Image: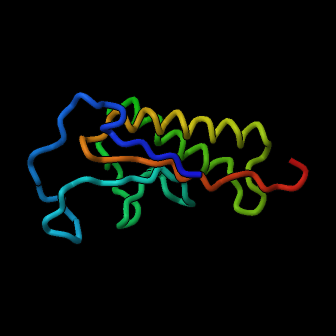
Amino acid sequence: MPTALSWLQLNPLVPPRTTIPYRAGSKRVWDCLDVHYRLMNDYSAEWPFWTEDGLSPTGTPTLTPNVSDAALAWAADFQKHYSYESGWPTEVAARHHERQGHRLLQMVARELAPGDSVELDYWETNRRKGL
């Protein structure tokens, strides 16, 4: 089940954004910039963030280097070890990757702009027989 955390849930004392800037590449000219991100792996996606418009460009959302590196490492782990035919090589690997996703979700949620939110869309459960 997806877990969604808004920036305001983690930072309740910070007032919401008051300006309405234009988001480059948006289909809506008057976008209020309250973006909902999905943290999700996909085949050949090096950057694991998605919006309603699809895969986010690398660097969107803007994160500190530490969190950005953690996101890239999480996606790289998926690319290297997850098989579309058999899932994760072991149950331990599957659970470790899922735990890292939940940890990364917390880290990202703390860094998002006011009004933005993120949820973990973890679909890569291990369905391999015998595990």
Q: Position of residue 6 (x, y in %)?
A: 36, 42
109 lies left or right of 122: left
When the figure is inspected, residue 28 is found, relative to residue 121, above or below; the finding is below
Quarter assignment of residue 108: top left
Q: Position of residue 78 (x, y in %)?
A: 61, 48
Residue furthest right as drawn: 130
20 lies left or right of 44: left
Using the image as rendered, state which of residue 58 and residue 12 is in the foreground. 12
Q: Residue at x 70, y 61 (%)?
A: 84
When the figure is inspected, residue 70 is found, relative to residue 33, above or below; the finding is above
Q: Residue at x 13, y 65 (%)?
A: 30
Using the image as rendered, state which of residue 81 and residue 10 is in the foreground. 10
32 lies left or right of 82: left
Q: Residue at x 37, y 60 (%)?
A: 51
Q: Position of residue 49 (x, y in %)?
A: 42, 52
Q: Position of residue 107 (x, y in %)?
A: 42, 32
Q: How many marks?
A: 0
The way the protein has been coloured in the rendering is rainbow
Residue furthest bottom as drawn: 27
Q: Residue at x 30, y 37 (%)?
A: 8
